[in-house]
Image (cartoon, rainbow, N blue to C red):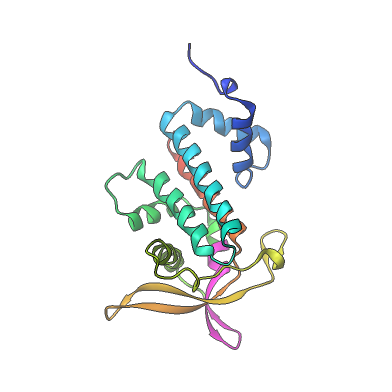
Amino acid sequence: MRATLKDFQKEDVRDLIVFLRPAFSNRTECMKFLKRCYKRRRAWYSLWGACWYVEIADAMSSVRRERPALNIIFLMGMAEAIARVRNRGFRSEKLVRHFFYKISEEDKELLLGGIRRTFGRGYYHRLRFSSVIKILYEARNAAVHGEDYFSFQLATSKGYARNAGYSYSVITSGRLGKRRNKKRVERLEIKMTYMILRDIFIRTAIRNLEVRR
């Protein structure tokens, strides 16, 4: 007899519902999405994998709150795992780019507004979206290889306003692509908190899974 979503323990489904909160405004829509995923084995396994990656990423804040690169390692790991289902054979960075092909315009604007180049004295420059993804990927790389855990920072939640409004920022640095065989280090103003970034990754993961109907 074929198993149904009701056969899972309530605790299991509850974990997924909590994970999906950033993407769905009500429980009904959330359950509809879960049922669609459950009918497709790869999507169902990918959803659970994404949930576990984010759970570990969240735990990193308790382990080392001052090292957001550790959170980013696991958020990027989730992005790679989701993208790899349809893009086997791609290297890590290309998988991350493919993952973000599905980002919503609203979340793209959140990223672009939350991570900007700064020239000091109130002067800022809007980065290209590909540059923002590159900065996050390079922060992940530096942490994975043990090179740098501290340079890239995220804003704290103290200044987070409702409706994704930003009222607090930190000045930090981020790496971009190479120029004259040297990686560029840009001075950045970060208004993005970990929770905002986390929710963007979750919603983008859901959009990637929704495409595979």
Q: Quadrant of residue 154?
A: bottom right
Write down the quadrant of residue 23 in the picture.
top right
| Residue 60 vs residue 192, the one in the foreground | 60
Q: Is residue 110 left or right of residue 90?
A: right
**Residue 117 part of the magenta segment:** yes
Provide residue 99's location: percent of width, then percent of height.
42, 51
Q: Quadrant of the C terminus?
A: top left
Residue 208 point in image, percent of width and height: 46, 44
| In the foreground, 70 or 97 | 70
**Residue at the image position 53 percent from the left and 53 percent from the top:** 57
Residue 120: x and y, percent? Answer: 56, 87
Q: Is residue 85 above or below residue 117?
A: above
- Magenta residue check for 134: no
Q: Residue at x 46, y 67 (%)?
A: 132
Which residue sits at x=57%, y=52%? 59
For the record, the magenta segment spans 110-125
In the drawing, does residue 89 fall left or right of residue 51?
left
Q: Residue furthest front?
A: 63
* Camera sees residue 2: yes
Q: Is residue 20 visible?
A: no
Residue at image coords 41%, 33%: 42
